[in-house]
Amino acid sequence: MPLVYGYPPTTSPTDARVRSARWGVLGLFALMGAMLSTFLSRMPSVRDLLDVSVSGLANLIIFGSFGALAGLMVTGWAAARFGTRALLFWSTVSHVAAFSLVAVSTVMESRPLFAVGHFFVSFSFAFTNVAMNAEAANVERRMGRAVMPQFHAAFSIGMAVALGIGALVSHAGIPPVTHFIAAAAVATVVRLAIIPAAAIDGMPDPDAAGATLGGPFATARAEYKERRVVLIGLIVFAASMTEMTAAQWMSIAVVDEFDRTESVGDLIYWVFVVSMVTVRWFGAPIIGRLGRVVSLRASAVAVVAGLLLFALAPALWLVPLAAMLWGLGAALGVPIAFSAAADDPKRAAARVAAVASFSTVAGLMVPPLIGNLGELVPMNVALLVVSAASITSFALARAVRKDGRLLGSRRAAERRVGSARLALADKDGPAIAPGAATGTGAPDAPVRGE
């Protein structure tokens, strides 16, 4: 049984054990965010060392998307068959091996080696992602309060810290191979140390022994027939596109189009990440105050404003402002869409899987689209294609309403209810008491969170 020292599996944890698991899972999220940003922070250098164009780099990056897709196809089955504790252990080993392969590819200037390494980095990441989210959900359930946003905030904090380190390392002239191997070694040691604490039980689940291959696509097959699910999936596609284009291309756009160093590009992307983390940390009260639809549309407007400023900025001092607007707008799209997909508890798992698959498809389509477009126009202009995704999100925002209405405004619906009351009053006598039309017995008021 791998990695049990100090924290044996238990199905009846004490409060202290749950607290330890919480800190362990927070650490896993932060480390995975840091490893992702370690790679992203050196993208311009990797491109130069592999001697590829922007479109060539895009074609290599897509192997990572295929790796993530392959991982998603088998993670559900693997978690049921072997347990999350084993998945966390073996994915740690495979991740460090694959990341080291990517590092070596930059020295050997081998594109095939980079493609293979990047495939297995993403493949391993998929296993870790599923396992640590499962453990996060277990901690949240044991604590009895909503702490899931904190885990995802830890991921973004890890990204921000690693971006800052990446900028310093790049400025110091340290080559990517040294940077990557050192980061992977440190992260691996820490991960192996905290896995026993993070996994409260993590053993195979006999009740889920029949889990099948196919990942979210298999789980969600029937849900694709539901129009609202498809529309929410398109919102997830747009939100994922908004995030991943910034992650993959923002730094390169700063280097190429503003003639700055890699470290400056990293700092600009750092502004994006910090802006996104800030909004996500306070996301619940924002959505509660404005409602889902207004929050989603405001986010889309912020993204478009940031993209336009990024593409048209006449001077570098405006670019951090553009990155901030872009990050503020990118923060809430995915959380809102996933919350909307889970509105029906009985079908939440399948519907979340269905909309998650749209993010996977975005990962396959977006890198080559942006990369090849960057060969025709300046990269900062090529990124304007994300505006189309944000406009789509704005147009489809009503799909995230809790009441399921896809067309027509809330005010129009309220007017129709009012007209129905008047008609009944004329026909039957006294007007219906406020709230009777909905069966609540309380005054009808706009429902926040729609």
Image (cartoon, helix red, strand yellow):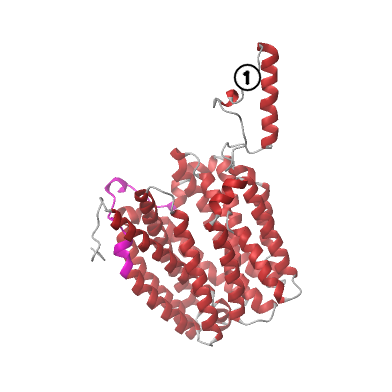
Q: In this view, does 381 lie above or below 417?
A: below
Residue that mark 1 sits on: 432
Is 198 a magenta residue?
yes
Q: Where is residue 256 in the image (x, y as percent from the top left)?
A: 67, 78
**Tag 1: residue type?**
Ile
How many marks on residues?
A: 1
Nearest the viewer among 300 and 110 is 300
Q: Which quarter of the figure has residue 73?
A: bottom left
Q: Name the residue: 23% across, 65% down.
A: 6
Determine the residue located farthest toward the top in the rendered image.
Answer: 428
Q: Position of residue 296 (x, y in %)?
A: 63, 50
Crowding at mark 1 (Cα within 10 Å: few <14, some 14-19, many 20+): some
Displayed quadrant of residue 200: bottom left
Going 57% across and 28% down the picture, which residue do you hit?
Answer: 442
Where the C terminus falls, by quadrant? top right
Give the vertical position of 378 relative to 443 (above or below): below
Residue at 54% x, 70% y: name it. Answer: 61
Residue 364 in sight in this render? no
Q: Is residue 312 left or right of residue 407?
A: right
Magenta run includes residue 206: yes
The answer to whether residue 315 is above or below residue 17 is below
- 380 w.r.t. 399: above or below: below
Q: Quadrant of the N terminus?
A: bottom left
Q: Which residue lies furthest to the bottom in this view?
A: 173
Q: Is mark 1 on a helix, strand or loop?
A: loop
Q: Of 376 and 307, which appears nearest the observer? A: 307
In x, y percent, where is residue 96? Answer: 38, 74
Span of residues in magenta:
193-215
- In the picture, measured across the screen, residue 31 lies left or right of residue 195, that is right
Left or right for 115, reference 368:
left
